[in-house]
Amino acid sequence: MKTKNQFILPLLVLILMASCDKVEYQSLSFYTDYLEVPTHGKAFIFPKTGSGNYTLEVENPLLFWAEMESGWSNPSGAIAVRGDLKGEAWLTVTDNVTKESKRLKIKVTDNYEAMRIYKDYDRENDKAFPLPPSLNNIEWVCLINNTARDLYLINRESISLTDYVLKVRGKGTYALGKEGEGYHLTLSYLVDEKEHPTLDATSAEPVSYRFRLSQNDYALHRLNQNLNLGFDTSMPGNWEEFISHAWETNIGMEGVDTEYRLVGALLPPFEMPVGYLN
């Protein structure tokens, strides 16, 4: 005769198998319902909660496209958005498990190049070269591909012990041109009475700094293509020699008639804070 335990064990196995088949997913939600992506650039949307199994519907596929991207650790998945033409349209995300849908507004903006800036080092005298005082607390300079040649000065603001947000501290213009065999970059923007970059033009003074550039062929080609500078450049065949393990490439910036000297590292995709670009 079979014992009671012989009947209970298969029953428990069946119950456990049934419970494993019924995974409870949280409702579909996002950290924000608005995203900006530059023309010919790429940005990511990370759902806050969801199954990770989504259908994407783009209102106007002429402006941008969107697709699921694998390889991220986020269990709710990752959505990649690439801009094609400037404009705004809706992206509808439907969770195929919970059958919920959410609409996100996507704006395709002007393209830009972001440089992480830091002090160059004087190896001969074993010390760092100085930065312009107004750039001491700035971490990134964004050069915008538009007719105005706008630039934005950005740094981080801590919101907790482990997290931060990007903040635009100043706005100005830039000029990047060729003189003889070399290239020069001029940065012009407003500063307050403490020589800090400012967005408030009411009590600000303009400053301007001109730099002589030393760049590799890849950096020049990238700036030329992404900012429509009109130079005659091409992608070098030895491009791998010019990028770091983090996919950055450096540009030397030596102040003209000043002691300032810095390095501008062209970054992999960088997301500007929203609300500033057309």
Image (spheres, rainbow, N blue to C red):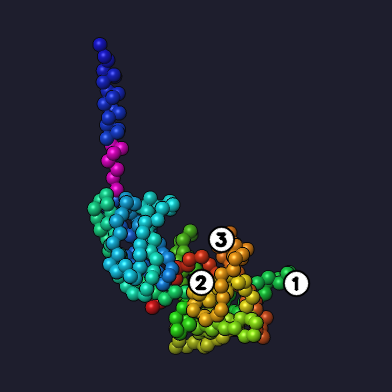
Mark 2 and mark 3 in contact? Answer it, CB < 8 Å: no
Percent x, y of residue 78? 38, 56
Which residue is depicted at the point 37% across and 53% down? 77
Q: Nearer the viewer, residue 139 or 111?
A: 111
Which residue is depicted at the point 59% across and 83% down? 178
Q: In what element is the residue under mark 2?
A: strand
Q: In what element is the residue under mark 1?
A: loop
**Which region of the structure is painted magenta?**
19-25
Q: Residue furthest left?
A: 99
Residue 125 numbered mark, or none: 1
Quarter holding the C terminus is: bottom left
- Residue carrying label 3: 246
Which residue is depicted at the point 56% across and 60% down? 246
Image: 250 above or below 134:
above
Mark 2 and mark 1 in contact? Answer it, CB < 8 Å: no
Disc 1 to disc 3, C-alpha distance? 29 Å
Question: Does the stretch in magenta take in 21?
Answer: yes
Quarter holding the N terminus is: top left
Hey, what amino acid is under mark 3?
Ala
Disc 2 to disc 3, C-alpha distance? 14 Å
Percent x, y of residue 139? 54, 71
Hey, what amino acid is under mark 1?
Asn
Labels 2 and 3: the sequence-earlier one? 2
- Pointer 2 local density, CA inside 10 Å: few below 14, some 14–19, many at least 20: many
Q: In front: mark 1 or mark 3? A: 3
Hey, what amino acid is under mark 2?
Ala
